[in-house]
Amino acid sequence: EAGVAQSPRYKIIEKRQSVAFWCNPISGHATLYWYQQILGQGPKLLIQFQNNGVVDDSQLPKDRFSAERLKGVDSTLKIQPAKLEDSAVYLCASSLISSFSYNEQFFGPGTRLTVL
Amino acid sequence: QKEVEQDPGPLSVPEGAIVSLNCTYSNSAFQYFMWYRQYSRKGPELLMYTYSSGNKEDGRFTAQVDKSSKYISLFIRDSQPSDSATYLCAMSDRGSTLGRLYFGRGTQLTVWP
């Protein structure tokens, strides 16, 4: 079974530039998550989709971050304009839908963003 | 106060040692407790999952949850160099996919041969 795919793996940009990350979840996984992991910290949820709809975006800095999941499969996360503090690894994860029991989140390898 | 506290280490042990990793939390609504392992330049992978209080064992790994103390632990027996990674605790108040995961900052473990 193929895992969660992310691209690019690394990105270096200047502050105030824009950047986009792409994620392809595991086939059949309706739930998709974007996390931000700053060096030395645990992942922090930015946004969660269930199919096409947003379930939780309460921690997404909406003035500069946006995300979409067209057709309920692939997703893109965009930052515009980037700030120095956005330097982090951006992780995408996916899981099956469940209303009752815990479902494991499967993580991609992440995109390491450096903002200069 | 952060929701989940975890000592970042680093922790360095010889091969064969017993390793103890711990997290504390403040939210009494947390019921689902997880340990993830993250190798360098990789995404986290689920190692153990426990619901509510109690112990769970899987091979060399044992997870313990003490909800009365708001304290969770992961024990690794007969540690191997391949166990060298960052270990992240995570927890949630809901088991469904609607439950947000709250992660600790991770403990970096090195097992030397």
Image (cartoon, coloured by chain):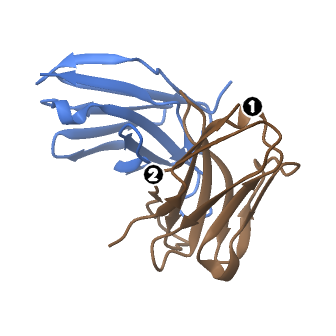
Mark 2 residue type: Pro
Circle 1 or circle 2, nearest the eye: 1
* Residue at the disc numbered 1: A84
Badge 1 or badge 2: first in the primary sequence: 1
Asked if residue A75 lies left or right of residue B53, the reply is right
Asked if residue B57 lies left or right of residue A9, the reply is left
Q: Position of residue B64 (x, y in %)?
A: 34, 37
Q: Nearer the viewer, residue A81 or B15?
A: A81
Question: From this viewpoint, which residue is outermost toward the bottom?
Answer: A71
- Write down the quadrant of residue B83 in the picture: top left
- Residue for point 84% across, 48% down: A64
Asked if residue B79 lies left or right of residue A6, the reply is left
Q: Position of residue A74 (x, y in %)?
A: 60, 73
Specify the colour of chain A: brown
Asked if residue A23 lies left or right of residue A49, the reply is left
- Write down the quadrant of residue B94 in the picture: bottom right
Q: Position of residue B25 (x, y in %)?
A: 56, 31
* Residue at the disc numbered 2: A109
- Tell me, for residue A61, which label it has, or none: none
